[in-house]
Amino acid sequence: MLKTIFYNLLVFFTLANLFYWSIPVVDLIQSARGDVTRGSGAVYRSFIEWRSRVSHFDNVNVEGPYLQRRTVVDRVTSQRKIYFFGGSTMWGSGDDDAGTIPSKYAAHTGTAPENFAELGWTAHQNLLYLIQILQDGRRPDVVVFFDGVNDVSAKCMIGSTPTSHGKEAEFASLVTGADRPQSFVYYFRGVLRLSERISQQLSGTTGASPYDCDKDTAKAEAIAANLVKDWQLAKQIVELYGGHFYGLLQPVAYFSRTDLAGLPLSADLGRQFSAVYPMIARKLANDPALHDLGSVLDGEENFYFDFCHIKPDGNARVAQKIAEIVEAK
C-alpha cells in the first residue's frame, strides 16, 4: 500500500512540474499571432524584460546584437537614420519581413530604417530600450514610437497597474520561491499555476471580465497619462541628441471605419479601448510630435488580421502616413 501511494505521488509531482514549466513557454508562443512568428521563443533581458531570440524561419528573421526583426531595403536614396519602436504590430506579427511597417516605409522613402519593436511591449519598455541604444552610442535622426494596444490590453487586466507590462504576473509567480522550497505548497506550484490559467480562460466563457478599465476611470486615466509621459520623455531624450521624435497612437479595429466582416472582436476588450483611447487622444492635442492614427485605415478594404495586427497593404498605408508626418517637419 505505501509503495503504491509513493509511486502515485511521484507521478503526480512529475506531471505537476511538467505543467508548471510548460505554462510560460506556451504563453510566450501564444502571445504572438501564429506560432511561426515567435520563432524559437524569447530571452529574458533586464529592464525591458524579454526580447525575441535569433531566428530564421519562412521569411521571418530576427537577428543581430539588438535582436531585431529584419527590415527589407531595396534602395537607399536617403541616409537619414530612422528607428521604429512598438509592439507586435510594428514588429510585424502575421507578416513576412517585406510586409512590416518599417519595410514598407523603406520602400516608400528610400531610407534604411531599423525595427526595434518587440512582441507585447508597452511604451515604457520601448522607452527603456531606446535609452539602452542611445547609451551604446547610436544616434538616430528620427525615432518613431507606435504604441497604445499593449498599454491598454496589458494594463487594463484586473490586478495590473498603470505601470505593469503584459508578463508582470507571470514573472512574479515564477520568481516567488524559485530557488528552493519555503513550504510544502512549493511542491504544488505547478498545479496552482495551472489552476490560475484555467480560471483565467474560464472567465472569458462565464461572462466574468478579466479587465477593469471600463469600471475604473482613475486607472484608465493613469494608463493614458503614463503612455503620453513615456512619449514625452522619449521626445526630450531624442531631441537632446539632435533627433526628432514622433509618438503615434496605433489604430485598432474597434475604431476603424473599415470592412470588419468575419473579424472576431472581443466586446469586453473593446470596452477597455473605449475607456482609455479617447483619454489618450485628448492628451495628444497640444503636442505636434504626437499623433492619433486611429483613422489611417478607414476605407472599404479590410486591413486587419485581428483587432490590431495589420496585413501588408495596411502596413503600407500606415508607413505612408508616417512618412507624411516625418517629412512635414
Image (spheres, helix red, strand yellow):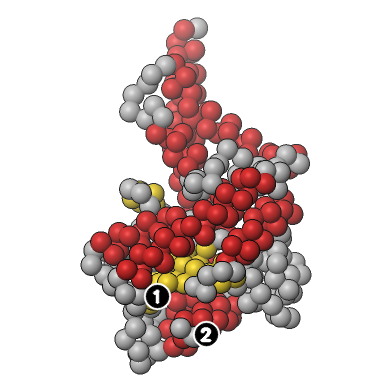
Residue at the spot x=42%, y=55% of the render?
125
Residue 51, image x, y percentages? 38, 56
Report the disc number at residue 264. Answer: none
Residue at the spot x=59%, y=78% of the render?
314
Residue 208, image x, y percentages? 73, 39
Q: Residues within 10 Å of mark 2 (few under 14, many from 20)?
A: few
Residue 197, image x, y percentages? 58, 37
Residue at the spot x=48%, y=23% of the render?
188
In the depicted structure, whether residue 8 falls above or below residue 327: above
Corner quadrant of residue 277: bottom right
Corner quadrant of residue 127: bottom left
The residue beneath circle 2 is 324
Q: Amino acid at mark 2?
A: Glu
Whether residue 129 is visible, yes or no, is yes
Residue at the spot x=63%, y=77% of the render?
296
Task: Specify which label sits upstream in the sequence, 1 or 2.
Answer: 1
Q: Pick the residue in front: 214 or 63.
A: 214
Q: Is residue 54 left or right of residue 123?
A: left
Q: Residue furthest front?
A: 286
Q: Nearer the viewer, mark 1 or mark 2?
A: 1
Kindly report the distance in space between the C-alpha atoms of the residues bearing marks 1 and 2. 14 Å
The residue beneath circle 1 is 244
Q: Pick the residue in front: 6 or 221.
A: 221
Q: Secondary structure at mark 1?
A: strand
Residue 237, image x, y percentages? 35, 64
Whether residue 27 is visible, yes or no, is no
Q: Pick the residue in front: 207 or 214.
A: 214
Q: Residues within 10 Å of mark 1 (few under 14, many from 20)?
A: many
